[in-house]
Amino acid sequence: MTSVAFHTLGCKVNQYETEGIWQSFKKQGYERVDFESIADVYVINTCTVTNTGDKKSRQIIRRAIRKNPEAVVCVTGCYAQVSPGEVMEIPGVDVVVGTQDRNKMIAYIEEHQETRLPVNGVSNIMKNRIFEEMDVPEFSDRTRANLKIQEGCNNFCTFCIIPWSRGLLRSREPEHVIEQAQQLVDAGYKEVVLTGIHTAGYGEDFTDYDFADLLNDLETKVQGLKRIRISSIEASQITEKVMRVIDDSEKIVRHLHVPLQAGSDSVLTRMRRKYTTAFYQQQINRLKEALPGLAVTSDVIVGFPGETEAEFNETYQFIQTIGFSELHVFPFSKRTGTPAAKMEDQVDDEVKHDRVHQLMTLSEQQAKQYASNFEGEIVEVIPEEVETIAGENYLIGYSDNYMKLRFKGERTLIGEIVRVKLTKAGYPFSDGEFVKLLVDPQLTTL
Ligand code: SF4
């Protein structure tokens, strides 16, 4: 049997797509082996979001080549899409496929095996207007079911290379989303996470079907689905209709991730983000009024070119005013080819790191503050991992409103929905006590 090994860099979409690529190899009779083993084919799914993403991708490619110089080394993903020439120049790379035409990958590999010549399968992504279907009915690590619903982005924020690696926004046909969600539920998953590059931009390329319609259909048409999570939604995408659907829903979780990036209007303008802090705040206020107890998480970039102390303080205060349940804080990292990389007044690393530290401390305070509202309450958690402490098994997982909880419990509960009493709010996780299993594990296949 021919063996294939995968390595995935970067985001959830890449993880999803590696699973999709694996499905096509599986259908052709390949055996999947660990990336550290000797394999016949190595597939490296690369990331290009920062210059470091490129560098790490190159390191992993070289590692595969060293491991088995006889193997076919196939490079795919965002770095391959944006810089195919650079990837082809690495001695030992045999096949390059970007972020489209993955269904041709095995044919390219076979072509290379016959001719021994390198194959460059990368073509212009900007011309693509069609969502490329990939079948992912299960995940190898069995913990989370990501469900990709759209591809690409039309925003062109000044720090971001992604539209160039993924192309313009295109949505998956609703029937395919529903069908895939049903397959995931049938495979035993309780929760699906709707994923994409600009996830809630779903439907912007359709005339009579939007993101709210999709949420509604997932809720009503997928039998046995317990939880729907939206991986990310822009402030402008929280329309009245979306809010109504969330409010009426019994399955969409009480958590939204709404990227902020900066809490200063002048920085937002330089980033070419399409909202002001006033608009963002108004959207969050409406959300919190409509959905009490909602957890709002966000991403923030600090040290964007020209960010002054005063602008950083505006961001800090804005975050204090909003009250997030957790923040992901990133120091600005130059990405060659983006307008921000060429901007003057790049911020010193030391200043960036100090600002990252300040915001992470604030995030920790806000996370504890949010979790403390639920002390003594019972929440529903899906355990994802086990940790053994002093010979006892502790399960770690997320509640519907995205609090990370740790509690004593058996490994068999992984992937199930369990009721847990939150006994002590903390960070990175709160402590809990197992109360009861919500679904009989005998009835599930996970
Ligand atoms: S919205 Fe901005 S940051 Fe997000 S993928 Fe699009 S261009 Fe990149």
Image: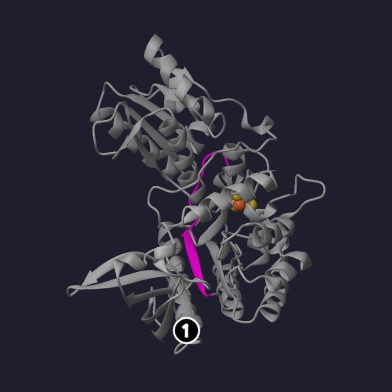
- Magenta residue check for 335: yes
Whether residue 159 is visible to the viewer of this picture, yes or no, is no
At 50% across and 47% down in the image, what residue appears?
334
Residue 181 in the image, given as x and y percentages of width and height: 57, 52
Residue 104 in the image, given as x and y percentages of width and height: 52, 24
At 40% across and 75% down in the image, what residue appears?
405
At 27% across and 68% down in the image, what residue appears?
387
Q: Secondary structure at mark 1?
A: strand
Residue closest to the eye, 115 or 138: 138
In the displayed image of the protein, which residue is found farthest to the right?
A: 208
Residue closest to the eye, 16 or 90: 16
Which residue lies under the disc numbered 1? Answer: 378
Residue closest to the eye, 148 or 321: 148
Magenta residues, start to end: 325-338
Tally of numbered discs: 1
In the displayed image of the protein, which residue is found farthest to the bottom?
A: 376
Q: Amino acid at mark 1?
A: Ile
Rendered position, 91 above or below 175: above
Quadrant housing residue 100: top right
- Horizontally, is 19 left or right of 309 in the view? left
- Horizontally, is 34 left or right of 51 in the view? left
Quadrant housing residue 258: bottom right
